[in-house]
Image: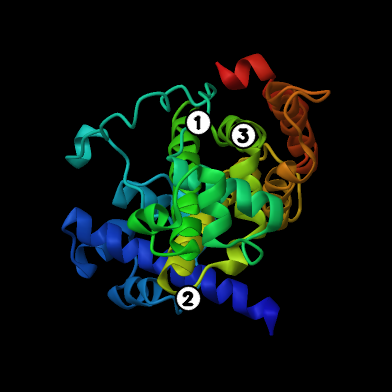
Amino acid sequence: MQQSAEPSLHRRALGRAVRELRRQRGLTVRQLAHQIGVSIGTVSAIENGRVGISSERVVVLADALGVRADRLLVGIAEPIRDERWGTTPAGPGPAGHGDWHHYEPLELDPALRGALASFLEVGYHGSTMRGVAERAGLSVAGLYHYYSGKQQLLVAILDRTMEELQRRTTAASDAAHDPWTRFALLVECQALFHSHRRELGFIGATEMRSLAGPARERIARVRREEQAKIDAEVIAASLAGAFGTPRPREAARAVVTMCTAIPQWYRHGGGMSPEQVADSYVDFALDLVQCEPALRPQPSEASG
């Protein structure tokens, strides 16, 4: 049962992306069908996730819709920012994240610093608002003035974590023009983040189960999007013959799991710097996906 569920989920994700992009382009189903040389019924079946689609057809669809083929392959509706599609580049992100290698000390308000310290020391369920207030140097009443409870504190910490990670991985992905180099940069970015921001990464790995309600699904969705970035590059590089792994999806998941586990063992001021950890993890990841030696990005090449 599990083996048949994943292809079905993938078809639905790809279909949603095709429909969204078609509408963004202002195309009817008939017009898209004509452009890619299939029937209206086939386009409808693709958009509704009822049929699979070959990698060759994905490339044709991607060209018609103005999206990178590797992104469309895993159901990400991210249009090419190109004048021929009438789109413009996104504006710059917050200061400091264009250079995704660079890390300033973590800045949190006193309440979030207190909550982070408490969650790291005794866990979410062992924490109390009084304990958080003591660590934050606030009165309990003062803490409640800003946050309604420890669930809101946890959500704020995880939102902060995922917002920064998203900005950095987007900048890393934009720095390369082929999927194997983008993969190496994304792994480097993930490893740097989970080393430099190990406290945030640790909470992200251990306290997702403590989230409740809409916030849980929202943050889980962002985490899936980050996984999908790696999935897309591994699949695209495999299709291009750069990676030899026979199981690209499983390899991509193993790579991300490897990176997100760094906070479990890494300590600031220990035997390795975050940069050394990242270099090692890029090597591990390229070995895992069986990168062709001639195409293997070197650290200086991958980071520019």
Q: Position of residue 112 (x, y in %)?
A: 48, 46
From the image, state whether disc 3 or disc 1 is nearer to you.
1
Marked residue nearer the N-terminal end (1 or 2):
2
Q: How many marks?
A: 3
In the picture, the quarter occupied by the C terminus is: top right
What element does badge 3 sit on? helix
Residue 162 visible in this rendered orientation of the protein: yes
Q: Which residue is mark 3?
A: 180
Which residue is depicted at the point 71% across and 31% down?
282
What element does badge 1 sit on? helix
Residue 296 visible in this rendered orientation of the protein: no
Quick one: label 2, few (<14), some, or many (20+) residues within 10 Å? some
Residue 237 in which image quadrant: top right
Determine which of the numbered discs, if any, sits on residue 268 in the image. Answer: none
The three-letter code of the residue at mark 3 reads Trp
The correct choice, above or below, for 289 with respect to 172 in the image is below
Q: Which residue is mark 2?
A: 51
The three-letter code of the residue at mark 1 reads Ala
Quick one: label 3, few (<14), some, or many (20+) residues within 10 Å? many
Q: Which residue is mark 1?
A: 172
Q: Position of residue 203 (x, y in %)?
A: 62, 52
Marked residue nearer the N-terminal end (2 or 3):
2
Query: Which residue is farthest right?
Result: 271
* Residue toward you, 298 or 45: 298
Marked residue nearer the N-terminal end (3 or 1):
1
- Tag 2–tag 3 contact (CB < 8 Å): no
Q: Position of residue 116 (x, y in %)?
A: 57, 47
* Residue toward you, 32 or 4: 4
What element does badge 2 sit on? loop
* Residue toward you, 168 or 285: 168
From the image, state whether disc 1 or disc 2 is nearer to you.
1
* Residue toward you, 1 or 93: 93
